[in-house]
Image (spheres, grey):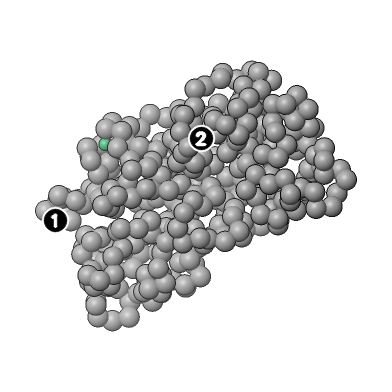
């Protein structure tokens, strides 16, 4: 263990920074590689880099970082997925899929999923480039500040972003690049091409962008979150990417809103495991059908047999169905009662 209560250098967390990003900056500020720094603090027994730190931050990590930096524990917790608990999903499970959270699919410390995203312009403007927690959210596909698409891989070598690996194979820290570099080919991520986001329909994109601003403010001063609409949006994303549950839904929406019908990856992959481009496309279609006119739009889709009614409620908990009931009255629920729960 390092001596003293505080680490010799203890940089403050930057706005919206993810715990993993901050921990690496703390290590570098103390003249150590992240791996060495972790071993010095936690020993060889407690492994840090074999997990998704921002999702599964162990108590011992958060407590130590809090004590050694003087940053209150509750603030440290908000640098992890705990910030979203009770907002974007009900409770954080230890493993398995988590609604809206991009998995890394780790295998021997290598990421097999494109779960870490970045805005090249944000990185470019950072005095010290760092990674935001919100970039790990499945609906955070564009930057509301710069109005450009995020990237989910290195623009040169196409490898997943893994900023904890930038030091690998480098003899000393001075050689190690900043987090703004690709760990594999050393390209600058901030030089990735910038593509303006195409807002092809005003209302859903306005709501979508408002949500991005709400998460950027860490839910401060935003009033109650419309959780029902979030649940519905996620359900529609799931249905659009599934091959079997609502096979006509994508084409149906595309025809109405005049968007191209794209071939989606045929697989049982969860929505959160799909690439940025596919997610962004699907999110747009799903945002359109689940906007403030959702009740009418869903009614029509159900009547035309483009959307099976029971799939709207698929896999939802009773409390979530009750949430949906606040914004939707669909054909059979007009009679009220518990009818819906039997249709899951
Ligand atoms: Zn940006
Ligand atoms: Zn690269």
Q: Residue furthest right?
A: 335
Q: Is residue 263 above or below residue 273?
A: above
In the rendered image, which residue does mark 1 sit on?
Answer: 172
Q: Is residue 196 above or below residue 94?
A: above
Q: Is residue 331 above or below residue 38?
A: above
Residue 130 position, x and y percent, is 37, 51
Counting residues from the start of the chain, the first of labels 2 and 1 encountered is 1
Pointer 2 local density, CA inside 10 Å: few below 14, some 14–19, many at least 20: many
Q: Residue at x 28, y 72 (%)?
A: 42
Asked which quadrant contains residue 220, the reply is: bottom right
Pointer 1 local density, CA inside 10 Å: few below 14, some 14–19, many at least 20: few
In the rendered image, which residue does mark 2 sit on?
Answer: 279
As rendered, which of 105 and 339 lies closer to the eye? Answer: 339
Separation of residues labelled 2 and 1 (CA atoms): 39 Å
Q: Is residue 80 left or right of residue 295?
A: left
Q: Is residue 145 visible?
A: no
Residue 231 position, x and y percent, is 65, 47
| Image disc number at residue 194 | none
Q: Residue at x 29, y 37 (%)?
A: 159
As rendered, which of 8 and 16 lies closer to the eye? Answer: 16
Provide the secondary structure element on which disc 1 rests.
loop
The reply to whether the residue tagged 2 has its Cβ within 8 angstroms of ligand 1 is no
Asked which quadrant contains residue 221, the reply is: bottom right
As rendered, which of 338 and 202 lies closer to the eye? Answer: 338
Q: Is residue 18 visible?
A: yes
Q: Residue at x 35, y 32 (%)?
A: 192
Provide the secondary structure element on which disc 2 rests.
helix
Q: Residue at x 28, y 43 (%)?
A: 181
Looking at the rendered image, the quarter that the N terminus falls into is bottom left
Residue 240 position, x and y percent, is 58, 32
Q: Is residue 70 left or right of residue 288?
A: left
């Amino acid at each position: 263990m390092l001596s003293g209560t505080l680490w010799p250098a203890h940089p403050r967390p930057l706005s919206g920074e993810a715990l993993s990003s901050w921990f690496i900056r703390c290590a570098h500020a103390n003249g150590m590689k992240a791996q060495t720094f972790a071993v010095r603090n936690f020993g060889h027994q407690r492994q840090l880099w074999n997990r998704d730190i921002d999702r599964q931050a162990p108590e011992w990590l958060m407590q130590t970082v809090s004590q050694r930096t003087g940053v209150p524990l509750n603030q440290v917790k908000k640098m992890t997925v705990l910030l979203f608990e009770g907002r974007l999903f009900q409770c954080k499970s230890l493993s398995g899929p988590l609604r809206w959270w991009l998995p890394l699919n780790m295998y021997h410390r290598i990421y097999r999923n494109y779960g870490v995203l970045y805005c090249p312009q944000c990185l470019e403007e950072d005095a010290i480039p760092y990674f935001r927690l919100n970039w790990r959210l499945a609906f955070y596909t564009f930057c509301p500040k710069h109005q450009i698409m995020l990237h989910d891989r290195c623009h040169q070598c196409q490898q997943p972003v893994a900023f904890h690996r930038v030091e690998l194979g480098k003899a000393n820290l001075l050689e190690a690049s900043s987090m703004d570099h690709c760990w594999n080919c050393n390209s600058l991520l901030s030089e990735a091409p910038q593509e303006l986001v195409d807002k092809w329909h005003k209302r859903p994109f306005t709501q979508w962008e408002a949500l991005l601003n709400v998460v950027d403010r860490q839910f401060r001063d935003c009033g109650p979150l419309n959780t029902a609409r979030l649940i519905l949006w996620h359900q529609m994303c799931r249905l659009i990417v599934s091959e079997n549950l609502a096979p006509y839904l994508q084409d149906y929406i595309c025809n109405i809103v005049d968007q191209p019908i794209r071939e989606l990856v045929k697989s049982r992959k969860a929505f959160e495991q799909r690439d940025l481009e596919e997610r962004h496309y699907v999110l747009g279609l799903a945002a359109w059908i689940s906007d403030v006119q959702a009740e009418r739009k869903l009614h029509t889709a159900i009547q035309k047999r483009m959307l099976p009614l029971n799939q709207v409620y698929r896999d939802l908990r009773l409390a979530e169905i009750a949430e949906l009931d606040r914004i939707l009255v669909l054909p059979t629920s007009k009679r009220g009662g518990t009818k819906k729960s039997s249709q899951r």
